[in-house]
Amino acid sequence: MDKLQIVYVVCGVMALLLLIWLRSLSVKRPDKMAGGISLGKKIAKCGHKTKIKGKITAFGQTTITKMPVNKDGSVDYCLDCIGKMAIRCAWCKEPIFIGDIITLYSPRDKDKFTLPENAVIYNEERMSVVGCGRTTCADTGADYAGSWIPDENGKGKVHRRPTMIEQSMANLTEGGNGVIIQNH
Ligand SMILES: [Zn+2]
Ligand SMILES: [Zn+2]
């Protein structure tokens, strides 16, 4: 080996060491910078680590849900806590998960109606109960009255949205022709 060859070998080894060092740096860095985030998981405000998208299970049924992410990148609840906020439809007893659309019917014969376990009464006076939006359960899309969302106490609640009939009535009382345009 002449001098030139030795120089090549030394340079080669040093370049290799430099590469290994750079790699080890770039591997460590994301952990340090991520804070609460690691491996695609976040710490939700409920205190649990969670994925943004994943399975939730309630009453023997599983669904895939995607967490709403706040403007600052935080999430309010983990998938487990969201799963625990699910209730049963007052009519078909199937689960109503957070984010699901709901109906607010009243039973025709209030005396004969028994509320299933884990179902929710919306209005005691009118005896309207929270039902699911399944096509096999709600009569028509016109009855969709809102959605099931988390409340401040870590439980589910009704997020009211006027039904098409209510929107139509409001339009009439405001002097319109009762025709409303549904854009979602
Ligand atoms: Zn949680
Ligand atoms: Zn139902």
Image (cartoon, rainbow, N blue to C red):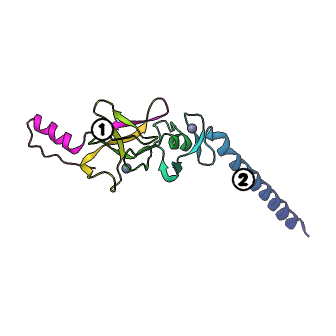
Give the mark toward the camera: 2 or 1. Answer: 1
Identify the residue shown where x is 11% and y is 34%: 173
Q: Is residue 169 magenta?
A: yes
The residue type indicated by label 2 comes to: Arg
| Residue 23: image tag | 2
Q: Name the residue nearer the viewer: 181 or 142.
A: 142
The residue type indicated by label 1 comes to: Lys
Q: Which residues are magenta?
A: 153-175
How many marks overall? 2
Residue 79 place in picture, x, y as percent: 54, 44
**Residue 175 vertical position relative to residue 9 in the rendered view, above or below:** above
Q: Secondary structure at mark 2?
A: helix
| Identity of the residue furthest to the right in this view | 1
Identify the residue shown where x is 67% and y is 44%: 29
Disc 1 residue: CB within 8 Å of ligand 2: no
Q: Secondary structure at mark 1?
A: loop
**Image quadrant of residue 8?**
bottom right
| Left or right: 74 in relation to 103 | right
**Residue with the mark numbered 1:** 110
Ligand 1: image quarter: top right
Q: Name the residue nearer the viewer: 103 or 55.
A: 103
Q: Name the residue nearer the viewer: 3 or 80.
A: 80
Residue 100 place in picture, x, y as percent: 39, 47
Is disc 2 in contact with disc 1, using a CB cutoff of under 8 Å? no
